[in-house]
Image (cartoon, grey):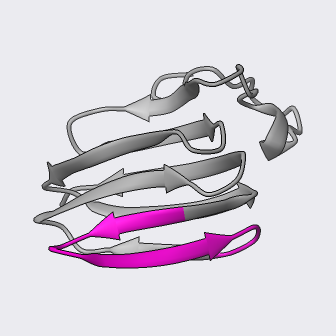
C-alpha cells in the first residue's frame, strides 16, 4: 500500500484491537503520518495525559473505549465517552487526559 501502513488491505480489523493497553503508558499506532494527514490510534491508561500543544491541523477525536477529556484554549474542556466524537479547529493548543482507560482514533488534516 502506498500511503497506509500498519494495516492489511481487504482484511476486517476490530478498531479496539489496533492498539493495546500497555500498563501505565500511552501507546499509539499510525496508519498515515504525512505533512497533510495524520491518522493514529491511541491507548491511554487511566490518568495518563498529553500536555497541551499547538496544532496547525484540524483534528477529529473518536472514542473507541472509555472516557477522555480534551483540554483546549485557555481552560475549556470536552468530555467524550465511548462512541462519541468531536472536531477541533486548527490553530489552537489542546491536550488529552484519560478519565478511564481509553482508546482513541485521531485524525488530523491540513489543507
Viewed as shown, does residue 75 lie left or right of 28? left
Image point (27%, 69%), residue name:
72
Report x, y in % for residue 109. Answer: 30, 56
Q: Relative to residue 32, is residue 1 depicted above or below? A: above
Stretch in magenta = 69-84
Does the magenta segment cover residue 10?
no
Report x, y in % for residue 89. Answer: 24, 74
How many numbered marks are there?
0
As rendered, which of 39 and 27 lies closer to the eye? Answer: 27
Image point (62%, 57%), residue name:
99
Q: Quadrant of residue 111?
A: bottom left
As rendered, which of 100 and 38 lies closer to the eye? Answer: 100
Q: Relative to residue 64, is residue 71 depicted above or below? A: below
Q: Quadrant of residue 28?
A: top right
Can see residue 52? yes
Viewed as shown, does residue 62 lie left or right of 81? left
Report x, y in % for residue 13. Answer: 85, 37
Can see residue 4? no
Report x, y in % for residue 45. Answer: 65, 36
Viewed as shown, does residue 39 lie left or right of 71? right
- Magenta span: helix, strand or loop, mainly? strand
Does the magenta segment cover residue 82?
yes
Viewed as shown, does residue 8 lie left or right of 57? right
Image quadrant occupied by the N terminus: top right
Q: Relative to residue 69, is residue 74 depicted above or below? A: below
Image point (83%, 33%), residue name:
17
Image point (20%, 36%), residue name:
35
Amino acid at each position: 500500500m502506498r500511503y497506509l501502513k500498519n494495516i492489511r488491505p481487504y482484511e476486517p480489523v476490530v478498531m479496539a484491537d489496533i492498539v493495546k493497553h500497555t500498563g501505565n503508558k500511552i501507546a499509539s499506532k499510525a496508519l498515515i503520518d504525512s505533512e497533510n494527514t495524520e491518522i493514529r490510534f491511541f491507548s491511554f491508561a487511566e490518568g495518563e495525559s498529553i500536555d497541551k500543544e499547538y496544532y496547525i491541523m484540524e483534528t477529529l477525536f473518536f472514542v473507541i473505549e472509555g472516557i477522555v477529556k480534551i483540554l483546549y484554549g485557555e481552560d475549556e474542556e470536552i468530555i467524550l465517552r465511548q462512541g462519541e466524537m468531536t472536531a477541533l479547529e486548527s490553530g489552537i493548543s489542546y491536550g488529552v487526559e484519560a478519565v478511564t482507560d481509553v482508546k482513541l482514533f485521531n485524525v488530523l488534516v491540513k489543507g
